């Protein structure tokens, strides 16, 4: 989807290590911002609780065919006359893979006061990694070739990988690489999802068939949502789509909104059909909003359609 190109502004080379006065700690600016976002969200959450083979009691629920007999809580069942299962909280670390679209279509900002979509996706990716690691989860970037890990070292390495990828945007793919992720793992995809719907559907369907739980985060510039332009406008594609001259942009606004809404409905239906979640985020909104919504979606399983 082509929109007026943002005014030229080169992203300053990301300083990988930043001197801190009187200390040996040196952090990438992206990592500093990401941890600030993660810490803000952490104060408003209570951790990710989920059922599993742990020792801490979580909840009672009604018995369902296929449940193991040893999970039945006979005392609770005797009190109510119904058969109840005693579920325990999962105590093992979860494996989470993260991917963000760094293709040319993400290099757009309609206003100098806004971040480019790829910059916001970088921030959300690293902030989510920091948040999950603080909760004891193991995190990895897709395509990096490293197993999920936790701790300061892996987080700093992720920041460096994202920074290097920012300098190779013309070579970045529109879809994440397919990797043999383990069953019950999580994968989070950040992107505008404005490319071929078939590619996204294939990615989601393949991972879901392997038992991987996923989360889609659509990152859009507010101008992509509202198409606020009027008059004679030349729209230039960011991925070799060429240019299109529209004499009265306001005349195509309704059709544009309808097509964008239809695409979003397709994405939401795709996600929910496979038990995945969907989050929409605009770059003029605080990053904490998207991170909090995403963290909540990772805590509560998505509803099946």
Image: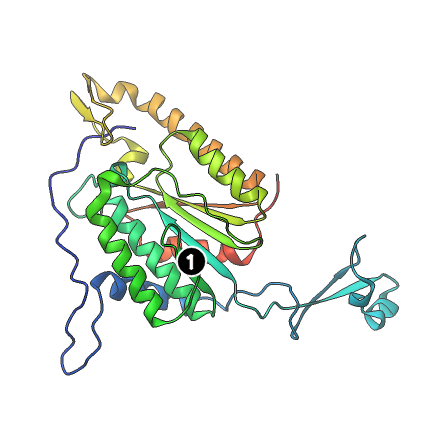
**Residue 128 lies in quadrant:** bottom left
**Residue 76 lies in quadrant:** bottom right
Residue 77 placement, left or right of 105: right
Look at 30% across and 56% down and name the residue there: 123
Q: Position of residue 294 (x, y in %)?
A: 45, 54
Q: Position of residue 91 (x, y in %)?
A: 58, 70
Q: Position of residue 34 (x, y in %)?
A: 30, 62
Camera-nearest residue between 224 and 122: 122
**135 over 119 or under it: above or below:** below
**185 over 176 or under it: above or below:** below
Look at 47% across and 70% down and name the residue there: 136
Q: Quadrant of the C terminus?
A: top right
Residue 12 placement, left or right of 297: left
Residue 51 placement, left or right of 286: right
**160 over 253 or under it: above or below:** below
Q: Position of residue 110 (x, y in %)?
A: 20, 39
Q: Residues within 10 Å of mark 1 (few under 14, many from 20)?
A: some
Camera-nearest residue between 244 and 22: 22
- SS for dot 1: helix
Camera-nearest residue between 109 and 253: 109
Direction top: furthest residue: 247
Look at 21% across and 18% down and name the residue there: 248
Camera-nearest residue between 245 and 199: 199
Residue at image mark 1:
292
């Amino acid at each position: 989807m082509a929109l007026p190109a943002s005014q030229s502004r080169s992203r300053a080379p990301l300083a990988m290590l930043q001197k801190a006065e009187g200390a040996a700690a040196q952090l990438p600016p992206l990592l500093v911002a990401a941890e600030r976002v993660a810490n803000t969200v952490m104060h408003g959450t209570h951790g990710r609780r989920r059922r599993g083979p742990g020792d801490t009691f979580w909840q009672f629920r009604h018995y369902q065919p296929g449940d193991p007999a040893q999970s039945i809580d006979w005392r609770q069942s005797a009190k109510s006359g119904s058969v109840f299962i005693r579920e325990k909280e999962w105590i093992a670390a979860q494996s989470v893979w993260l991917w963000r679209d760094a293709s040319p279509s993400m290099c757009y900002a309609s206003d100098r006061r806004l971040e480019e979509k790829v910059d916001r996706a970088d921030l959300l990716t690293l902030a989510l990694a920091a948040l999950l690691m603080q909760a004891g989860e193991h995190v990895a970037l897709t395509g990096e070739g490293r197993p999920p890990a936790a701790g300061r070292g892996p987080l700093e390495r992720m920041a460096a990988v994202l920074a290097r990828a920012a300098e190779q945007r013309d070579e970045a793919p529109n879809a994440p690489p397919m990797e043999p992720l383990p069953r019950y793992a999580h994968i989070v995809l950040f992107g505008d999802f404005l490319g071929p719907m078939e590619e996204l559907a294939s990615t989601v369907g393949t991972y879901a068939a392997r038992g991987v739980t996923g989360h889609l985060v659509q990152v859009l510039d507010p101008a992509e949502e509202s198409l606020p332009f009027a008059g004679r406008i030349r729209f230039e594609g960011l991925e070799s789509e060429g240019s299109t001259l529209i004499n009265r942009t306001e005349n195509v606004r309704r059709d544009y909104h309808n097509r964008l809404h239809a695409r979003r409905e397709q994405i939401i239906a795709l996600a929910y059909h496979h038990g995945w979640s969907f989050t929409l985020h605009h770059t003029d909104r605080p990053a904490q909003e998207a991170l909090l919504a995403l963290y909540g979606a990772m805590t509560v399983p998505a509803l099946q359609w």
